[in-house]
Every structure is written in structure tokens, then in C-alpha cells.
Image (cartoon, rainbow, N blue to C red):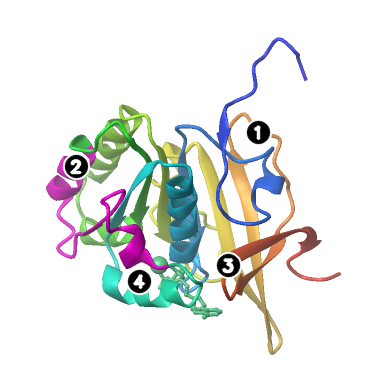
């Protein structure tokens, strides 16, 4: 690599093992798509990511478009993450948008202060389903990502993809706006399931090109095994 080219500044993802797959972390201010089929652990991974920022004194915003954050908060307690407590001093803010009002989401992003360093939108596919027939969808999503880019915040956006598909986005529009893509899989071979995670794209980064094993572990959440493949050979 050319020594004159400065490396991208990176932040710790907060997911044990994941940073080893991508030169030490997510590049600062990137918009990263986290794609995966139902129940792979996308939300868990995103929460771990936000909590990591809190540890470093950052503020964080979670925009929930799917399940209510109350259900999610209970699930996170199983991993030793007490979101009620973490949200007490407003360093972590949860915004549920059950009506999937795009205007409301834009306003939240516009009003985000400069001290918010980590943002999650989970899952964008909910929004895309709602506006499926809207011909301006591409433009709307572009506007949304542009307003995020103006903010100097590192963002994870989740999207749900069908199981066993090679598709990395549900609507074929989420991926082109992303600087990076992480895919979570839940493969089945016979009666066995395997969980796998892959850094599918990360601009400016020499990332692993393997699908690595991950597990959902007590007191942790998602843990990636950088030295193990998802399916043993
Ligand atoms: N205590 C636990 N220990 C281990 N695994 C768990 C535990 N609780 C939930 N899981 C696993 O985590 C999955 C849910 O994780 P999560 O909600 O983060 O996934 P998701 O990809 O966001 O799901 P969705 O598609 O519903 O949004 C469950 O389907 C289950 O497989
Ligand atoms: Mg989820």
C-alpha cells in the first residue's frame, strides 16, 4: 500500500471479533448496510454498536421502524445490556416510528445534534415495503442518506433479505447508497443451522472475503469468530 495515502479513520464496532475482518473497525462517517434474513441478530448487533459509542462518551440515536423498542429492550437484558439505564441521561435516544412516517424520520435526522456520533435505522426495509409502489422511492432514500451525510455521524441501516438469497438488499436500492455492507446469514444444511457473517463491501478497506462464524452469546450478544468459517469444511 502507498505510504502517502492516509488510512481511513476507524471506530470500534463494539462487536467482538468483527473489527478483525475490516482493518480495525468501521470507517468514520460511513453509512453501512447490515443485511440479513429474519432473526439473524441485526438489531442485537446494532445495539452493541451504539453501546460501544456510549462507552466513549458519545451520544447515539436509534430510529426503530420495526418491533417496538420495549420488546427489544427486554431482549437486550438477556445480553446484560440495560437500555433503560443507558437511556436515562439522554445520551442514548430511542425513537419508534410505527407509522413509518418518512417526514418524521427526516426531522429526527435534521434535529440531531453534532454530539450524536452513532446512528441506527432499523429496519429500512419496513419503510421500503410501505412505499413500494412509490416511483420517487429512490429519490427519497437518496435524500435521507444525503441528510445523514451532512451530519458527520457513522450510521448502520438494517435491511431484511430473504433467506438463502444472494441478494444483499431487499429492494436493490439500499446497497448503492451504502459505503459498506455487512451480511448476516442463517444457513441450513440438513437439520443443522449455521450462523455466518461477512463484510461484503467496505470502501477503502482490505476486508476478509470469508463468511465467518458468529454466535449470539449470553452477556455479549453477537460475537464473531474471525478465525473460523461459518460452515466447517
Ligand atoms: N438469549 C438469547 N440467546 C441466544 N440467542 C438469542 C437469544 N435471544 C434471541 N436470540 C436469537 O436472536 C434472534 C433475534 O435477534 P435480533 O432481534 O437481533 O435479530 P434481527 O435480525 O434483528 O431480527 P428481525 O428480523 O426480527 O428484526 C432470535 O431469532 C434468536 O435466534
Ligand atoms: Mg431486528
Pointer 1 residue: 205
Q: Is residue 4 left or right of residue 12?
A: right
Q: Is residue 212 left or right of residue 80?
A: right
Q: Are marks 2 and 4 in contact (CB under 8 Å)?
A: no
Q: CA distance from mark 3 to mark 4?
A: 15 Å
Residue 7 image position (x, y, % from top left): 64, 23
Residue 161 visible in the picture: no
Question: Which residue is farthest top?
Answer: 4
Q: Residue at x 43, y 71 (%)?
A: 76
Q: Earlier in the sequence, mark 1 or mark 2?
A: 2
Closer mark to the observer between disc 2 and disc 4: 4
Q: Magenta segment, which residues?
A: 82-109
Q: Residue at x 14, y 49 (%)?
A: 104
Q: Residue at x 59, y 26 (%)?
A: 8
Pointer 3 residue: 220
Pointer 4 residue: 73
Between 86 and 102, the residue placed more toward the observer is 86
Pointer 2 residue: 106
Amino acid at each position: 500500500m502507498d505510504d502517502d495515502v492516509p488510512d481511513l479513520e476507524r471506530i470500534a464496532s463494539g462487536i467482538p471479533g468483527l473489527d478483525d475482518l475490516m482493518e480495525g473497525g468501521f470507517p468514520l462517517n460511513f453509512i453501512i448496510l447490515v443485511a440479513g434474513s429474519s432473526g439473524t441478530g441485526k438489531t442485537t448487533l446494532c445495539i452493541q454498536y451504539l453501546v460501544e459509542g456510549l462507552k466513549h462518551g458519545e451520544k447515539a440515536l436509534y430510529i426503530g421502524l420495526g418491533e417496538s423498542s420495549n420488546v427489544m429492550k427486554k431482549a437486550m437484558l438477556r445480553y446484560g445490556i440495560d437500555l433503560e439505564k443507558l437511556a436515562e441521561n439522554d445520551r442514548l435516544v430511542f425513537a419508534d416510528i410505527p407509522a413509518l412516517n418518512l417526514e418524521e424520520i427526516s426531522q429526527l435526522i435534521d434535529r440531531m445534534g453534532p454530539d450524536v456520533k452513532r446512528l441506527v435505522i432499523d429496519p429500512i426495509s419496513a419503510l421500503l415495503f410501505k412505499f413500494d409502489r412509490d416511483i420517487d422511492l429512490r429519490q427519497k432514500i437518496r435524500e435521507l442518506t444525503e441528510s445523514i451525510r451532512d451530519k458527520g455521524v457513522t450510521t448502520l441501516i438494517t435491511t431484511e433479505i430473504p433467506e438463502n438469497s444472494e441478494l444483499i438488499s431487499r429492494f436493490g436500492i439500499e446497497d448503492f447508497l451504502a459505503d459498506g455492507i455487512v451480511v448476516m446469514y442463517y444457513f441450513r444444511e440438513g437439520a443443522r443451522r449455521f450462523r455466518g457473517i461477512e463484510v461484503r463491501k467496505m470502501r477503502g478497506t482490505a476486508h476478509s472475503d470469508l463468511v465467518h462464524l458468529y454466535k449470539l452469546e449470553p452477556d455479549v450478544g453477537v460475537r464473531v469468530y474471525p478465525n473460523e468459517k461459518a460452515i466447517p469444511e
